[in-house]
């Protein structure tokens, strides 16, 4: 198992290095293998394609680490996610722009949908529209994160998460005030 992880990490490191100077669409599996002096057979033993490798990078570097942490709230997870993206922003600026089947953008959205499904299940018990809510919030968060991380001078992750949280909370309060104001009339 250790050798397998070493191989995967070497391939991941090679892809990250190549993406610094070469557009993802121009990088071949052969380029990745040449950079870390492996053969294509080794690559395909571990990954379906280069898209699968990008998804593995995210999972192994971020998602696996979540299992070892205890969070007070979902906002703390978001803060960790934004810290991770910010620290690796050069890579993820490019990874989130990749389009097509198996793209990281789609993979990331699917991961968020899984998280939102659990959260919304608790918040909106027995709600017939929960699938719509999950899709809406997943798409909104991905779009917001892509816009934030793609900005050349993107703000610090702490500032971004505070603004995101206040945006959602202030909007919810405004709606509740409006609903309560209409109910009192």
Image (cartoon, helix red, strand yellow):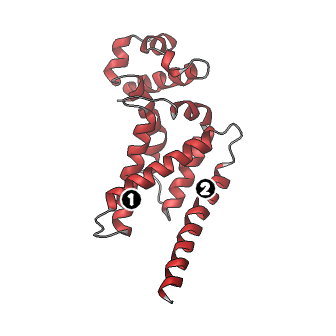
Q: Quadrant of the N terminus?
A: top left
- Helix, strand or loop at label 2? It is helix
| Labels 1 and 2: the sequence-earlier one | 1
Q: Residues within 10 Å of mark 1 (few under 14, many from 20)?
A: some
Viewer-nearest residue: 182 or 64? 182
Q: Which mark is residue 161?
A: 2
Residue at figure coordinates x 55%, y 35% from the top left: 92
Taking the image as shown, residue 160 lies to the left or right of residue 94, namely right
Kindly indicate whether the residue at mark 2 contacts the one at mark 1 (C-beta within 8 angstroms): no
Image quarter for residue 124? bottom left
- Is residue 62 placed above or below 122 in the rendered structure? above
How crowded pointer 2 is (Cα within 10 Å; few <14, some 14-19, many 20+) is rated as many
Residue 152, given in percent of the width and then of the height, sits at: 69, 36
Is residue 179 shown left or right of residue 124? right
Q: Please tell me which residue is depicted at 35% across the width and 56% down the height of the picture.
A: 132
Residue drawn at (52%, 20%) of the image = 14
Q: Position of residue 38 (x, y in %)?
A: 43, 12
The answer to which of 143 and 17 lies nearer the viewer is 143
* Position in image of residue 32 (x %, y %): 47, 16
Picture coordinates of residue 100 (x, y %)?
40, 28
Image mark for residue 133: 1
Residue at the far right in the pictured view: 153
Where is residue 5, by image quadrant? top left
Q: CA distance from mark 1 to mark 2?
A: 21 Å
Does residue 121 lie above or below 61 as drawn? Answer: below
Disc sitting over residue 31 in the figure: none
Please identify, in this view, whether the residue under mark 1 or under mark 2 is nearer the observer.
1
* Local secondary structure at mark 1: helix
């Amino acid at each position: 198992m250790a050798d397998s992880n070493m191989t995967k990490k070497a391939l991941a490191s090679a892809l990250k290095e190549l993406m610094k100077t070469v557009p993802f669409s121009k990088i071949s599996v052969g380029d990745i293998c040449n950079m870390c002096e492996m053969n294509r057979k080794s690559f395909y033993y571990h990954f379906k394609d280069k898209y699968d490798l990008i998804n593995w990078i995210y999972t192994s570097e971020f998602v696996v680490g979540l299992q070892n942490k205890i969070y007070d709230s979902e906002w703390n997870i978001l803060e960790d996610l934004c810290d991770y993206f910010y620290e690796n922003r050069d890579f993820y600026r490019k990874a989130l722009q990749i389009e097509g089947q198996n793209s990281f953008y789609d993979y990331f959205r699917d991961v968020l949908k899984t998280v939102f499904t659990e959260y919304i299940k608790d918040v909106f018990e027995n709600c017939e529209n929960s699938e719509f809510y999950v899709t809406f919030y997943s798409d909104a968060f991905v779009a917001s994160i892509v816009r934030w991380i793609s900005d050349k001078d993107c703000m610090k992750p702490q500032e971004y998460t505070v603004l995101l949280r206040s945006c959602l909370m202030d909007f919810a309060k405004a709606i509740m005030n409006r609903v309560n104001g209409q109910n009192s009339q």
